[in-house]
Amino acid sequence: MTEKNEDEQPIAGKRPLQLRTGCETAIDAEDLVRVSGRDVTPERLAWAERLLKEKGPAAAERYLP
């Protein structure tokens, strides 16, 4: 919800909060590398692909709150 002033106009600089649950799309190897806080490299993509094959989408749970 956007904050509004007395005239019911949106306050400048405020925007609606957009939450994502993660269920909109499947996590891929690049996503997993990024949520782990690392830079994307071919080696790290290979690591992430292996981890996703082993654990599936649950592989990201150790990095996400």
Image: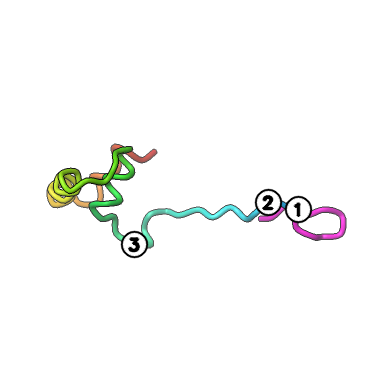
Residue 30: image tag? none
- If you read the primary sequence from the N terminus, does the residue marked by circle 3 or circle 2 appear first? 2
* Residue on which disc 1 sits: 11
**Dot 3 alpha-carbon crowd within 10 angstroms: few under 14, some 14 to 19, many 20 or more:** few
- The residue at the point 66 percent across, 55 percent down is 1
Taking 7 as reference, is 58 above or below it? above
Which stretch did the figure color magenta?
Answer: 1-11
Under circle 2, the secondary element is loop
* Residue on which disc 3 sits: 25
- Distance from Cα at disc 3 to Cα at disc 2: 27 Å
Query: How many numbered marks, from 0 up?
Result: 3
- In the image, residue 59 lies at what x, y percent? 23, 44
* Residue on which disc 2 sits: 14
- Magenta highlight on residue 10: yes
| Residue 4 in which image quadrant | bottom right
Q: Main secondary structure of the magenta part?
A: loop
- The residue at the point 69 percent across, 50 percent down is 13
Taking 34 as reference, is 24 above or below it? below
